[in-house]
Amino acid sequence: MVITAIDIDERHRFRMLELGLRRGTVIRVTQRSNFHGRVVAKGTERIALDGQTAAHIHVRRAEHPASPTATPTK
């Protein structure tokens, strides 16, 4: 997923920037927890987000280029 927007107040937005979570960052959800919390991966890092914060991060599906080693079969 690619972050498209983070819709939270300035204080919390600054913390997201410190963690490297900003518009255009590619993340992957690795765990879902009770109360809608998430653990997301950004590169080799893992970041735990509470449900309320996670709800304010807007994402879209990342585009995956075709694998250069893929060959069509007949």
Image (cartoon, rainbow, N blue to C red):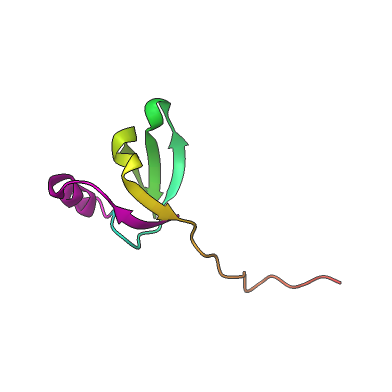
- Quick one: quadrant of the N terminus? bottom left
Residue 30 position in % (x across, y down): 46, 41
Residue 51 position in % (x across, y down): 34, 34
Q: Give the range drawn in magenta.
A: 1-20
Q: Is residue 65 magenta?
A: no
Most foreground residue, 70 or 26: 26
Most foreground residue, 18 or 4: 4
Q: Which residue lies furthest to the top in this view?
A: 34
Q: Which residue is drawn at 26% across and 49% down?
A: 7
Residue 39 position in % (x across, y down): 39, 39
Above or below residue 27? Residue 34 is above
Visible residue check, residue 25? yes
Visible residue check, residue 44? no
Above or below residue 71? Residue 51 is above
Q: Which residue is drawn at 61% across and 70% down?
A: 66
Q: Is residue 11 magenta?
A: yes
Above or below residue 18? Residue 64 is below
Q: Residue furthest right?
A: 74
Residue 28 position in % (x across, y down): 45, 49
Q: Which residue is drawn at 41% across and 25% down?
A: 34
- Quick one: quadrant of the C terminus? bottom right
Residue 73 occupies which quadrant of the picture? bottom right
Numbered circles on residues, count: 0
Q: Residue at x 19, y 52 (%)?
A: 18
Q: Is residue 12 left or right of residue 53?
A: left
